[in-house]
Amino acid sequence: MIEVKKCAYEVIAEYYTPLYYETHVIGQGRVDLFVDNKVMVELKTLKELSKADEIQLVSYLNASRIKVGLLINFGQTVTIKRKFRDYLLPKENR
């Protein structure tokens, strides 16, 4: 978080984002870091990332309607996975 702030980005730790189903807010999810009000960052400290870790990030992106997410693992080596989603609202809300 300190390094990201040094680069003049706005960073919020443990950010709570609304979760949606269609046009309805159905709850909230917690994101490790939220950068510039548009990038979700999930942090891990595992020996290696699993497919389940990537699925978790994609699920958060889908439910929150945030378009870009990073999964960063500080395990034996630093691994970064980038995920991108584009969302269309139902026709009556476009």
Image (cartoon, rainbow, N blue to C red):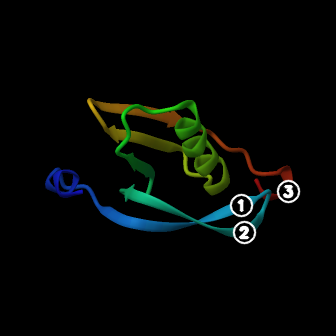
Q: Position of residue 61 (x, y in %)?
A: 59, 48
Answer few, some or many: residues within 10 Å of disc 2's Cα (few below 14, many 20 plus, some between 14 and 19). Answer: few
Which label's residue is closer to the chain start, 2 or 3?
Answer: 2
Q: Which mark is residue 43?
A: none
Numbered disc in front, either 3 or 1: 1
Which label's residue is closer to the chain start, 2 or 1?
Answer: 1
Tell me the element at label 1.
Answer: strand
Cα separation between marks 2 and 1: 4 Å
Residue 68 vs 1, above or below: the answer is above
Q: Quadrant of the N terminus?
A: bottom left
Mark 2 touching mark 1, by CB under 8 A? Answer: yes
Q: Position of residue 35 (x, y in %)?
A: 36, 55
**Residue occupying the point 43% across, 49% down:** 42
Cα separation between marks 2 and 3: 17 Å
Q: Which residue is mark 3?
A: 92
Tell me the element at label 3.
Answer: helix
Does 64 sit left or right of 70 as displayed?
right
Answer few, some or many: residues within 10 Å of disc 1's Cα (few below 14, many 20 plus, some between 14 and 19). Answer: some
Numbered disc in front, either 2 or 3: 2
* Residue that sits furthest to the left in the current view: 6
Q: Which residue is mark 2?
A: 25
Q: Position of residue 25 (x, y in %)?
A: 72, 68
Q: Position of residue 37 (x, y in %)?
A: 42, 59
Residue 58 vs 65, above or below: the answer is above
**Residue occupying the point 51% across, 32% down:** 50
Amino acid identity at mark 1: Tyr
Amino acid identity at mark 3: Glu
Which label's residue is closer to the chain start, 3 or 1?
Answer: 1
Does 7 sit left or right of 45 as displayed?
left
In the foreground, 33 or 76? 76
Q: Which residue is mark 1?
A: 20
